[in-house]
Image (cartoon, grey):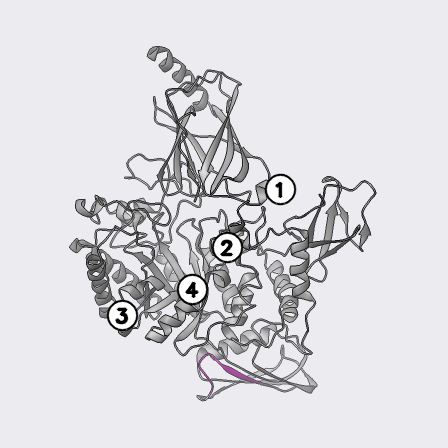
């Protein structure tokens, strides 16, 4: 029997090495809550080779936050390897699969999904005989049934599914409120504007710069006459922001005077290039938009469990190994696949692979400095360090600590370094030194270092071990004259007198107020307002996470941030677990970034909700379109009054298209009466600036 199996395997290998995949897959999501907190899906395996598929293979894939439930009655075993990386193997009951045959398996998971993109990715097959990976294609069934989009447990329905009626009411709230008489066409709005009776031509006017120490840092004053613009400021940033405002004003205009300054000194975006990598030009593109919105901090997440993304000349092992993910049994040449999966760690086009060279990072620093943006690196520690732990080949390991059992938030059991080894602090100091050299060469101030400090799994370290390590790290930062920063968890190990800046990510005001009252400088990074990687709404076509809520362009605007002398700013987060391209990064960031910009500059904005909506859609998004950037647009609402159908959208100039039969789409121009033979569902979408919204569903049953 073994000889026959080996013979069939050899034929299969010849087939797949000839360029044809020996299998194809199809994934269809079933429904949530088949049992409490249990979802089910169906995986169909088709043998596309010329030989029978036997039991000598392993199928690998990645799927985040849905852990398979073992099924003793199945022919296959599904196991989690680490994080989102899983494998499927045939067990003793697996029946050989003849050529051109298919078999469907029902798979149950702990967790839930209501988005089409919450499916396994990066399938590849490895036969025991040669241990060579082969990419396996997979198709995915779209969501077509209501039970796929909804969840049956009331606990999960705090935010309703974004169906036609929900979106109709949501849109009406954004466009039907009061509007201001005079609003300048820019975000953030200046604090004080005076209009005159003459037209002032900004484009040809001479500039006269004046220094005025009474103007707040980053603030400016502009006085316009018919042929001259007088700009006063107390800093170079103030002059820069004045010119930024002038570029966005219409010319000529009747504005005669502007006085403006930011309410918060820290106005930042956290960009994660670790989970999925985006090259230097993508980072520069974001910096350009940040500068236009007067944002001044790029919080740069450069290392985590899944990769190390910055060249350290003193530690070449980090990027040689930990900047790549692919098929490996030993993790000596690369890390395991995660998120988008795939087996080829040499593929330069995969977002799993890549890093910023030293020269590229220096280029980013200089580019940011020209736009008065500080770049703050984050190297998360002592958890979230799986990548560097693997790259350093044992130097950050300890047999006693490694024997401890723990399980992290992203489902890793080996991501905490051996903090008791002297080399742990040597490693950190080497990293800090290499960063310091880059900032020195770039001619940029190196004043802050973010140590992360979050999500250290319970059981990985004793409190004494953890405290001793953080004390050592703080000593290193002190020697380099660096102010420590980290997520709110660092308050357990950094006393207020360290002046560690704490990023408060919990929803609500209790945690940031507690830290501010204790004396910590606090940056608000509130999840349900500022986690821009969250999905825009509960809709099956949306991407993004949603563990702390949903965020859209209004979430970052329509709130009043907590006021306290120790609250120093706002920071938006762009975690990259669900990103698969830079276009998707832009989709999640724009237009959410405009609410951040307005609210960080003006804690008490004079803009109404309708003012803000009009500025976003009639001023800012046309600019994004003109510069070739991707962005998200709000979907249309569908309202039914008896048998009359009404539709709305938030932007002037947006074209709504709808279908009653799922085939023929027509432009909505006015309310209409449903036909006598009522359809089961109405679908609609918006087209605006050559972009298309997600499709709104309105069930009629």
Distance in Å between CA atoms under marks 4 and 1? 41 Å
Q: Are marks 1 and 3 in contact (CB under 8 Å)?
A: no
Return the residue nearer the eye: 454 or 11: 454
Above or below, 651 against 107 in this view is below
Q: Residue 298 carries which label?
A: 4
Marks 4, 2: nearer the viewer: 2
**Which span is picked out in magenta?**
215-222
Residue behind mark 3 = 495
Residue under numbered circle 1:
146
- Give the image location of residue 376, x and y in percent: 37, 65
Count of numbered marks = 4
x and y percent of residue 410 in the render? 38, 48
Q: Is residue 447 above or below residue 116?
A: below
At x 25%, y 67%, the residue is: 477
Foreground disc of the pair 4, 1: 1
Q: Distance between the residues labelled 1 and 3?
A: 51 Å
Q: Name the residue under label 2.
A: 534
Badge 1 marks a residue whose secondary structure is: helix
Which of these two is toward me, 271 or 629? Answer: 271
Give the foreground label among 3 and 4: 3
């Amino acid at each position: 029997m073994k000889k026959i199996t080996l013979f069939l395997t050899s034929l299969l290998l010849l087939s797949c090495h000839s360029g044809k995949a020996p299998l194809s897959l199809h994934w269809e999501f079933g429904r949530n809550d088949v049992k409490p907190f249990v979802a089910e899906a169906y995986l169909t395996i088709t043998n596309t080779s010329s030989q029978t598929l036997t039991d000598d293979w392993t199928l690998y894939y990645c799927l985040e936050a849905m852990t398979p439930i073992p099924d003793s009655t199945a022919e296959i075993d599904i196991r989690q390897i680490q994080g989102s990386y899983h494998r499927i193997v045939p067990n003793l009951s697996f029946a050989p699969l003849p050529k051109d045959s298919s078999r469907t398996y029902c798979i149950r998971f702990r967790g839930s999904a209501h988005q089409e993109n919450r499916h396994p990715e990066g399938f590849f097959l490895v036969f025991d005989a040669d241990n060579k990976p082969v990419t396996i294609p997979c198709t995915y069934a779209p969501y077509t049934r209501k039970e796929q989009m909804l969840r049956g447990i009331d606990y999960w329905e705090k935010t309703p599914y974004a169906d036609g009626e929900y979106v109709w009411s949501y849109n009406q709230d954004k466009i039907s409120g009061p509007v201001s008489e005079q609003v300048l066409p820019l975000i953030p709005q200046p604090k004080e504007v005076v209009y005159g009776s003459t037209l002032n031509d900004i484009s040809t006017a001479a500039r006269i710069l004046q220094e005025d120490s009474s103007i707040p840092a980053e603030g400016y004053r502009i006085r316009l006459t018919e042929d001259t613009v007088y700009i006063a400021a107390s800093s170079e940033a103030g002059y820069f922001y004045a010119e930024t405002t002038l570029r966005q004003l219409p010319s000529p205009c009747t504005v005669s005077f502007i006085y403006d300054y930011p309410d918060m000194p820290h106005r930042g975006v956290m960009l994660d290039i670790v989970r999925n990598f985006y090259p230097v030009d993508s980072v520069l593109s974001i910096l350009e938009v940040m500068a236009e919105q007067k944002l001044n901090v790029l919080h740069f997440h450069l290392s985590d469990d899944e990769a190390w993304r910055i060249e350290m000349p003193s530690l070449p092992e980090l990027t040689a190994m930990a900047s790549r993910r692919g098929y490996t049994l030993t993790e000596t040449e690369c890390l395991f696949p995660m998120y988008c999966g795939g087996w080829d760690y040499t593929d330069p086009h995969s977002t799993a692979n890549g890093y910023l060279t030293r020269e590229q990072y220096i280029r980013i620093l200089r580019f940011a400095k020209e736009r008065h943006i500080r770049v703050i690196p984050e190297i998360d520690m002592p958890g979230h360090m799986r990548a560097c732990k693997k790259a350093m080949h044992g130097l950050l390991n300890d047999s006693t600590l490694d024997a401890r059992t723990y399980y992290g938030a992203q489902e890793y059991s080996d991501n905490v370094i051996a903090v008791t080894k002297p080399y742990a602090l040597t490693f950190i100091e080497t990293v800090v030194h290499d960063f310091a050299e880059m900032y020195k060469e770039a001619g940029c101030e190196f004043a802050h270092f973010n140590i992360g400090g979050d999500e250290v799994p319970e059981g990985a370290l004793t409190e004494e071990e953890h405290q001793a390590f953080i004390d050592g790290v703080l000593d290193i930062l002190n020697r380099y004259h660096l102010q420590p920063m980290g997520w709110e968890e660092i308050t357990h190990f950094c006393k207020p007198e360290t002046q560690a800046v704490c990023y408060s990510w919990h929803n609500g005001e209790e945690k940031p107020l507690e830290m501010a009252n204790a004396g910590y400088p606090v940056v608000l990074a509130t999840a349900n307002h500022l986690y821009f990687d969250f999905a825009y709404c509960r809709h099956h076509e949306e991407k993004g996470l949603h563990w702390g809520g949903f965020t859209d362009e209004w979430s970052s605007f329509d709130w009043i941030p907590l006021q306290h002398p120790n609250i120093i700013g706002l920071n938006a987060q762009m975690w990259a677990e669900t990103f698969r391209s830079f276009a998707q990064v832009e989709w999640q960031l724009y237009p959410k970034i405009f609410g951040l910009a307005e609210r960080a500059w003006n804690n008490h904005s004079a803009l109404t909700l309708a003012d803000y909506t009009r500025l976003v859609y009639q001023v800012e998004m046309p600019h994004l379109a003109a510069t070739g950037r991707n962005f998200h647009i709000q979907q249309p609402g569908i309202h039914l009054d008896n048998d009359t159908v009404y539709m709305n959208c938030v932007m002037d100039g947006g074209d709504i298209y709808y279908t009653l039969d799922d085939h023929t789409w027509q432009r909505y121009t006015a309310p209409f009466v449903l036909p006598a033979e009522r359809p089961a569902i109405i679908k609609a979408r918006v087209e605006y600036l050559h972009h298309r919204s997600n499709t709104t569903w309105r069930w009629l049953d």
